[in-house]
Image: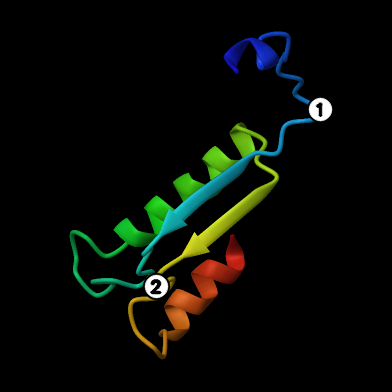
Amino acid sequence: MASQYSDYQTNENSDFRIMVATDNHLGYLEHDQIRGDDSFVAFEEILSLSKLYKVDFLLLGGDLFHHHNPTKKTMYLIIKF
């Protein structure tokens, strides 16, 4: 059966790229002096990698925010992205 697909060549225009990021927990320890921005830095890296690899679909699964009612700071920083 593998020989059936041996002539298939990857075409960047026909590929559908998906990136999956889960449990971002934005705002986790945001008041901590050392780890305060870690969740936002990681989220920015996810967005940058999505752009770098030209993904067509970014699936954010799990918990996007750490608290069910995010702080104004968290909401402001996410809207800025």
Amino acid type of the residue that numbered disc 2 sits on in the rendered structure = Asp
| Residue for point 70% across, 45% down | 56
Q: Give the distance between the C-alpha atoms of the residues marked 1 and 2, in whole angstroms.
A: 32 Å
| Residue for point 44% across, 71% down | 64
| Residue for point 53% across, 75% down | 76
Q: What mark, if any, has residue 28 been given in the picture?
A: none
Q: What mark, if any, has residue 63 been given in the picture?
A: 2
Q: How many marks?
A: 2
Percent from the top left, x then y, of residue 1? 60, 18
Q: How crowded is mark 1: few (under 14 residues within 10 Å), some or many (20 or more)?
A: few
Looking at the rendered structure, the secondary structure element under dot 2 is loop
- First in sequence, mark 1 or 2: give its number: 1
Percent from the top left, x then y, of residue 80? 59, 65
Looking at the rendered structure, the secondary structure element under dot 1 is loop
| Position of the C terminus by quadrant | bottom right
Q: With 62 as the anchor, is 52 left or right in this view?
A: right
Question: Could you say which quadrant of the image residue 67 lies in?
Answer: bottom left
Q: Residues within 10 Å of mark 2 (few under 14, many from 20)?
A: few
- Asked whether the residues under the numbered discs 1 and 2 touch, taking CB atoms below 8 Å apart as contact, a structural biologist would say no
Q: What mark, if any, has residue 13 been given in the picture?
A: 1
